[in-house]
Amino acid sequence: MSNPCPKEPLLSAYLDSELTDTQADELRKHLADCPGCRRVLESLGHADTLIRDLPPLSPSAAFDRTFWEKIETLERESRYRLWARHIFTGWRPIWAGAIMAIVVAVLVYSGRNDPLSPEDVFIAEHMELLEDYDMIGQLEMLEQLDATEMMKDLS
């Protein structure tokens, strides 16, 4: 595949009379010597003619309504994204965290206010002993396991 001619990007502007006189003169001289650019210019001219010969389009009766509905939807989504972005930037997260801490504190401190039963107080005061008791029970099971293994070894 051959490399495109460096003058090829100017062909569409030449066809639309958008080049300066100097640029157009230089391109005409180039077209006399470059068959590739002449073929591209001919193709562009053919496509341009086909497009100009198309009948004009007229929008449907519902076009205006649906167009503005889509615009409204896009604007609504844009506002939502903007609102969401503002929530997570600046001072808002700090305020939100402070408000959440206050709400949690109120919920925690507004809980049960009735006094603890004597059983609850006893359990709280002797929690360490209860944990040790569980451990002692497990040690007794290990001793029984050792005794069982010794009996197996004797037999």
Image: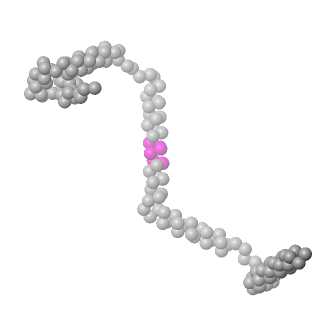
Instruction: Indicate yes or no whether the magenta region holds residue 86.
Output: no
Can residue 38 be seen? yes
Residue 40 lies, in percent from the top left, at 24, 20
Residue under the image location 41 percent in, 22 percent down = 59
Residue in view at x 65 percent, y 72 percent: 108
Of all residues shown, which one is farthest toward the right? 155
- Residue at image point 85% right, 78% down: 150
Residue 7, position as x, y percentages in the image: 18, 28
Q: In the figure, is residue 65 to the left or right of 44? A: right
Give x and y (percent) for residue 24. 12, 24
Q: Quadrant of the N terminus?
A: top left
The figure's colour scheme reads: one colour
Q: Quadrant of residue 42?
A: top left
Q: Is residue 94 above or below residue 2?
A: below
Looking at the figure, which quarter contains the C terminus?
bottom right
Which image quarter: residue 57? top left
Answer above or below: position of 145 versus 12.
below
Q: Please state if 152 lies on the left or on the right of 35 as rendered.
A: right
Report whether residue 148 is seen: no
Asked if the stretch drawn in magenta spans residue 79, the answer is yes
The residue that appears at 31% across and 15% down in the rendered structure is: 50
Which span is picked out in magenta?
75-80
**Can you say whether 3 is above or below 117 in the image?**
above
118 relative position to 80: left or right: right
Q: How far across and how far down the image is residue 140, in percent? A: 83, 80
Q: Is residue 93 left or right of residue 5?
A: right
